[in-house]
Image: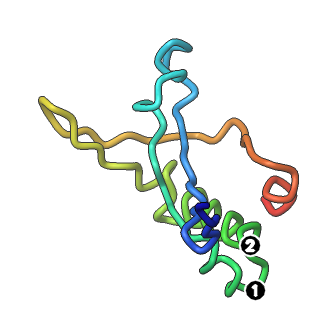
């Protein structure tokens, strides 16, 4: 019998661009990974995943290095692009959304 090993579980954080066509937003490739955290490591952070989510959003959205001011560099097959974003909303579980 295999034993469940919770030490290897991860939390993954993604963003997607609202302006993409709906059919494209439904594809895995349209969701950009912005962070991954092993659940055993999250337990050592005061506030856990919820606190981490708040910090991650503040880093991405606020200040001179936020996505609306500094942009995000994307390397595409043909060329490189610098994209700028405005945030329209968040999707997440209730505890994570309460931290934002």
In the picture as drawn, the residue positioned furthest to the front comes out as 1
The x and y percentages for residue 96 are: 79, 58
The x and y percentages for residue 33 are: 46, 49
The residue at the point 73 percent across, 41 percent down is 91
Q: Residues within 10 Å of mark 2 (few under 14, many from 20)?
A: some
The residue at the point 54 percent across, 69 percent down is 8
Mark 1 vs mark 2, CA separation in Å? 7 Å
Of marks 1 and 2, which one's residue comes earlier in the chain?
A: 1
The residue at the point 65 percent across, 76 percent down is 42
Residue 64 visible in the displayed image: yes
Q: Is residue 46 above or below residue 50?
A: below
Q: Report helix, strand or loop for mark 2.
A: helix
Whether the residues at callouts 1 and 2 have beta carbons within 8 Å, the answer is yes
Q: Is residue 14 left or right of residue 33?
A: right
Q: Quadrant of residue 7?
A: bottom right
Q: Residues within 10 Å of mark 1 (few under 14, many from 20)?
A: few
Residue 62 visible in the displayed image: no
Q: Is residue 97 left or right of residue 64?
A: right
The x and y percentages for residue 77 are: 15, 32
Q: Is residue 99 above or below residue 73?
A: below
Q: Is residue 21 above or below residue 49?
A: above
Quadrant of the snapshot with the N terminus: bottom right
Q: Nearer the viewer, residue 95 or 1?
A: 1
Quadrant of the snapshot with the C terminus: bottom right
Find residue 13 and name its label. none
In the picture as drawn, the residue positioned furthest to the left comes out as 78
Q: Report helix, strand or loop for mark 1.
A: loop
Residue under label 2, please give it.
Answer: 51
Find residue 46 and name its label. 1
Q: Nearer the viewer, residue 78 or 28?
A: 28
């Amino acid at each position: 019998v295999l034993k469940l090993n919770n030490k290897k579980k991860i939390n993954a954080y993604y963003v997607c661009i609202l302006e993409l066509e709906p059919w494209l937003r439904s594809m895995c490739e349209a969701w950009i990974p912005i962070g991954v955290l092993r659940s055993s490591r999250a337990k050592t952070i005061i506030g856990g995943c919820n606190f981490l989510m708040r910090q991650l959003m503040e880093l991405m959205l606020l200040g001179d290095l936020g996505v609306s001011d500094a942009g995000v560099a994307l390397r595409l097959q043909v060329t490189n692009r610098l994209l700028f974003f405005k945030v329209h909303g968040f999707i997440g579980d209730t505890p994570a959304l309460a931290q934002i």
